[in-house]
Image (tube, rainbow, N blue to C red):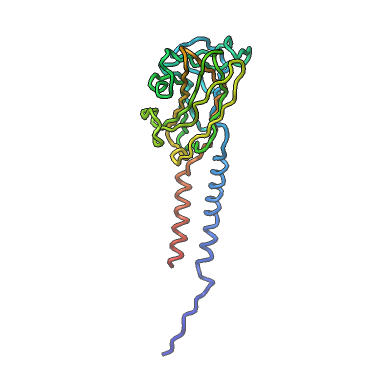
Amino acid sequence: MSFHKKQKNHKFDDRYPMKSRLLPILSVCVASFTFGLAQSKAAIIAKFNFDTDEGNVGDAGTFAMNSTAANVTSTGFSFGSGASTSSTNSAAPASTTDFSTILLIGGSTTTSQATARANNAYGQFTLDANPTYSLNLRNQALTFELAKGGASGTRQIFVEMSLDGFATLTPDSVNTFTVGGPTTATDNTAFQSVSYTMPDVVALESLAGAVTFRFYSFHNGTNLSVRLDDVIVNGSVIPEPSAPLMLISSLGTCALLRRRRA
């Protein structure tokens, strides 16, 4: 009896067809990844410019968001019980075409960051990504225009953001974060440009839930106000991988691993 060494016939080796079958799968995955990178490029995702003269509307005043990026929703710019608002152009800096909201801080006790929080002396809005999308706000810019509502006194503003709707009132770097400030409003005849950078925190990198921004104000007098205009939030809107694409990617990975073990 003779024994012959079995020769491996490459003609029937399935490794090469397997590679050919995997190429389209990998191409789809790469294309999807590239699409995700394009969608996640930082840009303006929300803006308030307050270009509507609503007059004195008191604590219940709410200004609609002027623009948001695709797949982003927003509440209006509303006010806490310790602040009221108007968007009249009668106060400095005067303008006949460009209105700006005004925070009127009630009482003489709102003189610090702590009392601004306690007295609800804020204006706020909330952003949220649509289903199957998330927001990346990590290290992104929040910008706005700031002015004093009058010539007297020292008026300051600071901004905080929260992932739990400010159930955690004081920043803890988990649910509520400091964005920037306090910044002193320096002029009542012209706006100054203010730019804050949102925290370098992983939790802000892929937000599938709502995030709320609060603009607090305090002063060293009674009923002193600050004016805001052109509030802009920069960030990126990230599409989540679709279920079919995740399935295709998983099947491709499993096929590769199975072939390596063969």
Quadrant containing the C terminus is bottom left
- The residue lying toward the viewer, choosing from 252 and 139, is 139
Q: Is there any visible trace of residue 168 in the rendered image?
A: yes
Does 162 sit above or below residue 35? above
x and y percent of residue 99 in the render?
58, 15
x and y percent of residue 251 in the render?
45, 55
Does 209 sit above or below residue 90? below
Residue shown at 46%/48% (left/top)?
246
Quadrant containing the N terminus is bottom left
Q: Is there any visible trace of residue 68 in the rendered image?
A: no
Residue with the most extreme right position? 96
- Marker count (numbered): 0
- The residue lying toward the viewer, choosing from 110 and 138, is 110
- The residue lying toward the viewer, choosing from 47 and 103, is 103
Residue shown at 44%/36% (left/top)?
208
Does 254 sit above or below residue 90? below
Residue with the most extreme bottom position? 1
Asked if residue 140 lies left or right of residue 169, the reply is right
- The residue lying toward the viewer, choosing from 161 and 195, is 195
x and y percent of residue 165 in the render?
39, 28
Q: Determine the image quadrant of residue 207.
A: top left
Q: Determine the image quadrant of residue 20.
A: bottom right
x and y percent of residue 35 in the render?
56, 44
